[in-house]
Image (spheres, helix red, strand yellow):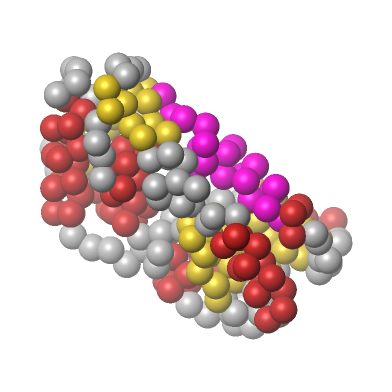
Amino acid sequence: MSVAPARVVVVEDEEAVRDAVVRALAEDGYAVAAFSDAREPQAILHGAPDLAVLDVLLPGGDGFALARTLRAHRDVPVVFLTARDGVSDRLAGFEVGADDYLVKPFALEELLARVRAVLRRTGRLSEPLQVGDLLIDESTGDATRAGHPLGLTPTELRLVAFLARHRGKLLSKTQILTQVWGYDAYGPNLVEVHVSALRRKLETRGSRMIQTVRGVGYRLVP
Ligand code: CA
């Protein structure tokens, strides 16, 4: 599908459902990780997922609490799988930032359609990001400035896409680190090194786009 497939993490304790969901997502081209309980949020976020599919009733905590924990550390869209069709459950889901939900039993094609829609809507799939003359297509892995390919590495692409999604906003190195590299990454140096490499590539093709705010972080501006 793409240079860097979108990463989806699935947390579901029912083995048959989990296996089916994982297989369907993998066949649709996603990089998939799966867990059977809510006990290890750090591990769940380890691969820096682009989307989480969470069962609501889980050993080790419910899916809503897990979503809250995950989203405290990473801006990850969540699609809930729920066996219960109660209105309060839906509301609770949306209160914790559910991007969508499916009531069991559901068709796998329906799940794939929802996942695709959420990834699109949250700028993680297909819809190219544009900031000034910078164009980023995460689904193909291409980034151009004024039509010139920038030759970004997958990490640089994730980095510039994150900056572009939050254009004009000051982002701390810690924020960038957890969002682009993952929950347990450390070392602001990693961010600095990649930002300077990215900046070199961006600025051979145009004016300065990444502003440095000393001691704080970075901001992408057109
Ligand atoms: Ca369950």
Q: Is residue 133 left or right of residue 191?
A: right
Q: Quadrant of the C terminus?
A: top left
**Relative to residue 175, is residue 169 depicted above or below?**
above
- Identify the residue shown where x is 37% and y is 26%: 135
Residue 56 on image: x %, y %: 70, 69
Q: Is residue 61 left or right of residue 139?
A: right
Residue 38 on image: x %, y %: 57, 76
Q: Is residue 203 magenta?
A: no
- Identify the residue shown where x is 50% and y is 69%: 33
Count of numbered circles on the image: 0
Q: Magenta part of the protein: which range?
A: 111-130
Between 187 and 201, which is closer to the camera in this rendering?
201
Between 211 and 115, which is closer to the camera in this rendering?
115
Viewer can see residue 23:
yes
Viewer can see residue 159:
no
- Identify the residue shown where x is 59% and y is 37%: 121
Residue 82 on image: x %, y %: 76, 65
In terms of image quadrants, where is residue 138?
Answer: top left
**Relative to residue 220, is residue 140 depicted above or below?**
below
- Identify the residue shown where x is 35% and y is 45%: 158
Q: Is residue 127 magenta?
A: yes
Between 103 and 212, which is closer to the camera in this rendering?
103
Q: Is residue 38 left or right of residue 74?
A: right
**Relative to residue 152, is residue 111 depicted above or below?**
below
Residue 208 on image: x %, y %: 18, 22
